[in-house]
Image (spheres, helix red, strand yellow):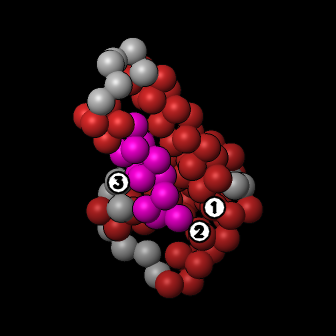
């Protein structure tokens, strides 16, 4: 995503909490549409240090739970259950 110029939630979190080094790494990668292996390693370390991936995952869990709460207003049935399972599947597929 970063090489395509896409700023995802972990990167937004890191921009807000990672200081000038993180900001420079992210902004340069987006601008240049490239990142060296060394800079990528440093960026991953900063993401871990500032728990940016954990933050984004927790937000995804919160959104999934909110979606399932809304689905509970519908009558039980296979369609509702499939949609409720989808929220859990999305959270599990990348972990």
Left or right, 74 with reference to 72: left
Asked whether disc 3 touches disc 1, contact meaning CB atoms under 8 Å apart, the reply is no
Residues at marks 3 and 1, CA–CA distance in whole angstroms = 16 Å
Q: Which residue is mark 2?
A: 43
Residues at marks 2 and 3, CA–CA distance in whole angstroms = 15 Å
The residue depicted at 39 percent of the width and 15 percent of the height is: 73
Asked if residue 32 is among those painted magenta in the image, a careful observer would answer: no
Q: Which residue is mark 1?
A: 47
x, y (%) of residue 37? 50, 84
Give the extent of the magenta segment.
83-95
Residues at marks 1 and 2, CA–CA distance in whole angstroms = 6 Å
The residue depicted at 33 percent of the width and 57 percent of the height is: 5
* Category of crowding for the residue at label 1, using alpha-carbon neighbours closer than 10 angstroms: few (below 14), some (14–19), many (at least 20): many
Whether residue 40 appears in this view of the structure is: yes
Asked whether disc 1 touches disc 2, contact meaning CB atoms under 8 Å apart, the reply is yes
x, y (%) of residue 33? 33, 67
Q: Secondary structure at mark 2?
A: helix
The residue depicted at 28 percent of the width and 36 percent of the height is: 78
Looking at marks 3 and 1 on the same chain, the residue that comes earlier in the sequence is marked by 3
Most foreground residue, 66 or 17: 66
Q: Which residue is mark 3?
A: 6
- In the image, farthest residue toward the bottom: 37
Most foreground residue, 16 or 92: 92
x, y (%) of residue 2? 39, 62
x, y (%) of residue 3? 34, 67
Whether residue 14 appears in this view of the structure is: no
* Category of crowding for the residue at label 2, using alpha-carbon neighbours closer than 10 angstroms: few (below 14), some (14–19), many (at least 20): many
- In the image, farthest residue toward the top: 73
Q: Secondary structure at mark 1?
A: helix
Q: Quadrant of residue 21?
A: bottom right
- In the image, farthest residue toward the left: 79
- In the image, farthest residue toward the right: 49
């Amino acid at each position: 995503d970063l090489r395509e110029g896409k700023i995802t939630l972990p990167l937004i979190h890191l921009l807000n909490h990672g200081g000038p080094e993180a900001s420079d790494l992210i902004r340069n990668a987006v601008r240049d549409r490239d990142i060296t292996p060394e800079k990528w390693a440093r960026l991953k370390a900063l993401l871990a240090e500032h728990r940016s991936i954990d933050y984004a995952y927790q937000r995804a869990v919160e959104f999934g739970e909110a979606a399932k709460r809304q689905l509970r207003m519908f009558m039980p049935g296979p369609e509702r259950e499939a949609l409720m399972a989808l929220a859990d599947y999305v959270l599990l597929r990348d972990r």
